Amino acid sequence: MPQVNTAQSLPPALVSETPRAVTISRSARLESIDVVRGLVMIFMAIDHTRDYFTYLRFAPESINRTYYALFFTRWVTHFCAPLFFFLAGTGAFFYGQRRTPPELTRFLWTRGLWLIFVEFTIVGFAWSFVPGFGFFGVIWALGASMVIMAAAVRLPIRWLGTLAVLMIVAHDLLDKIRPAQFGSFAWLWTILHVRGGVSLFGGHMRSVVLFQIVPWVGVMAAGYVFGAFYRLDQRERKRWMAILGIAMIVAFVFLRATNLYGNPPVGLGGVSQGDWHIQPTTEKTVILFFDVEKYPPSLQFLLMTLGPAIVLLAWLDGRHVAGVFKPLLVFGRVPMFFYVLHLYAIHLLAVLMAVLFHQPVDWLLHGAFMMKRIPDGYGHGLPFIYLMWLTVLVLLYFPCLWFMGVKQRRKDWWLSYL
């Protein structure tokens, strides 16, 4: 069993520069990581179902109007994006264990460019049903981060880990820097670190930047370094993963309770209400405690989401998952396929329900909530939203199960891009 490197307070596998020092079992990681990935995929579907079916005209983060059921329906989906990036990095690490460094680099930049293309075409149309519509969403940011990681993975793993932690921890120091300070390059700073609109190609393209590069590329890099835990003996890695996850949870609670650092003040983030403080009611006080910034994700946001996820990975590691876990395993093994299908399924189901309930339909066919306000007379409450969410999951399980089988039976190069 590897010994703890007391000089650096890290297990040797995390600082070893020999990338193939230990063979990583495919089965050892697939079931735990893919179950967690599948879990966040279904969480994501809750949020997108709510987007298309809700009758509410305010955001779930609006502290003056939200309530437990609404806020935590939204809050549980906060785990999705951090895990997408983190586990994409871990997957890249595993891919690199089976390929040469040039092959890993080529895979990352080609898949990254493919994802950017998909975001502004297939995915953009799924959101809006408007040809040519697109925005800088999660798929774009995953693609851009992979392109950057194509070069970054050539760094020694300890350097990459240091840069990842530095970006995640220190990027909140940049919150007060605003795009206008960069003049004609304001668009670049928005893409890098600020939620907002950008005009590209001489003003001929106007789009919204929802997911920025910083610190998401740092989260992907951290996930890549995290893959080195799987060089360890299973018992040892479970211990280190549990220590890391619990430490992150404790750090979140401390930073949030003290407002010491790690979350932007009101107005500098995308949705956060700023520092935590006691509210007139217990409900509002609890909600504000967990209402941390996602656009871009603050340090507190990443500690809050990645910490419990790493603890869950430690708990699942080595367990045989079956029965109730099987749908999660299926969705987790075909994440991109599920992502594209679920957007089309939810959007089409919204159109169908609007027709059946004699609610406004035209707006759903010409931009939906991405481009238009919710019209009067449209929408449903949370119970109906959850019913539609479950309907979508049942409908998508069977094509996802089929495609998982295709990927297991065939090794065509293009399947790794889906």
Image: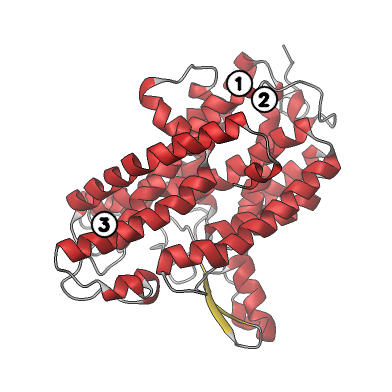
Which residue in the protein does label 1 denote? Answer: 28
Which residue in the protein does label 3 denote? Answer: 279
Residue 49 horizontal side relative to residue 319, left or right: left
Residue drawn at x 84%, y 32% as measured from the top left? 17
- Image spot of residue 315 (x, y percent): 49, 22
Say which amino acid is labelled 1: Ala
> Could you tell which of marks 2 and 3 lies nearer the N-terminus?
2
Is label 2 in a helix, a strand or a loop?
helix
Foreground residue among 88 and 287: 88
Residue 251 horizontal side relative to residue 411, left or right: left
Please tell me whether residue 393 is drawn above or below residue 6 in the rendered image.
below
Which residue in the protein does label 2 denote? Answer: 230
Residue 119 showing in the rendered view? yes
- Does the CB distance between marks 2 and 1 fall below 8 Å? yes
Residue drawn at x 72%, y 36% as measured from the top left? 95
Residue drawn at x 53%, y 25% as measured from the top left? 31
> Could you tell which of marks 1 and 3 lies nearer the N-terminus?
1
